[in-house]
Image: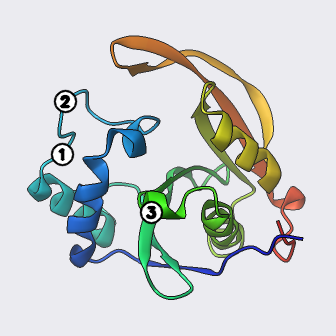
């Protein structure tokens, strides 16, 4: 059985800006991310400003850096659209360092963020939106325990065309933290 790699989630620092900026220059990394239709999508200064807002909790995002077991920064994960009244939030994730794609790091990071969201924030449901042609991501979300709620028709404008997104969610009662994926 394949073991899940070790990851740690930590608060963002301004030192993360240069790596984040570099990753956002890679169109393969950003293809399925909600980014402005320009290149580069953000300047280094805009990237720093975004991270500063995350650090100061002024943009509604609970965003964390994803680190490998060896401490290498490889991406980010967040909860946003947090609804404390109804106890749900939207998850977003990106492994920016392509050397770590398809090796279980995204699943491991997701498991840690789900645990944090359910236990620390007291959420009942964590949902996401994923483009219907992002089959690799959909497969990993299903593996984590996410279930499909429905299709959001023409939900994202990507490269001048509207694409459908699938809405998926996992409930607190469905999530098992100790499970090996």
Q: Residue 5 placed where, x, y %?
A: 67, 76
For this rendering, which residue is in front, 149 or 19?
A: 19
For this rendering, which residue is in front, 147 or 89?
A: 147
Residue lying farthest front?
A: 99
Q: Residue at x 33, y 12 (%)?
A: 160
Which corner quadrant holds the C terminus? bottom right
Q: Secondary structure at mark 3?
A: strand
Residue lying farthest bottom?
A: 70
Q: Is residue 110 above or below residue 27?
A: below
Residue annotated with mark 3: 76
Which corner quadrant holds the N terminus? bottom right
| Badge 1 density bin: few <14, some 14–19, many ≥20, Cα 10 Å | some
Residue annotated with mark 1: 42
Disc marking residue 152: none
Residue annotated with mark 2: 38
Q: Residue 73 placed where, x, y %?
A: 41, 75
Q: Residue 8 placed where, x, y %?
A: 55, 81
| Badge 3 density bin: few <14, some 14–19, many ≥20, Cα 10 Å | many
Q: Secondary structure at mark 2?
A: loop
Q: CB under 8 Å between callouts 2 and 3?
A: no
In terms of image quadrants, where is residue 53?
bottom left
Q: Residue at x 19, y 30 (%)?
A: 38
Q: Residue at x 50, y 61 (%)?
A: 77
């Amino acid at each position: 059985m394949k073991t899940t790699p070790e990851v740690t989630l930590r608060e963002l620092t301004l030192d993360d800006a240069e790596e984040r900026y570099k990753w956002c220059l890679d169109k393969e990394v950003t293809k399925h991310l909600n980014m402005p239709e320009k290149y580069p999508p953000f300047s280094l200064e805009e990237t720093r400003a975004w991270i500063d807002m995350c650090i100061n909790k002024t943009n509604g995002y609970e965003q964390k850096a994803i680190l490998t077991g060896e401490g290498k920064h490889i991406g980010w994960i967040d909860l946003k659209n947090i609804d404390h009244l109804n106890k749900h939030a939207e998850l977003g994730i990106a492994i920016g360092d392509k050397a770590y794609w398809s090796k279980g790091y995204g699943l491991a990071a997701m498991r840690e963020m789900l645990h944090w969201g359910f236990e620390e924030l007291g959420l009942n449901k964590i949902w996401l939106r994923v483009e219907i042609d992002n089959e690799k991501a959909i497969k990993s979300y299903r593996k984590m325990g996410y279930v499909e709620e429905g299709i959001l028709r023409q939900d994202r404008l990507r490269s001048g065309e509207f694409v459908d997104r699938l809405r998926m969610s996992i409930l607190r009662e469905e999530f098992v933290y100790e499970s090996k994926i």
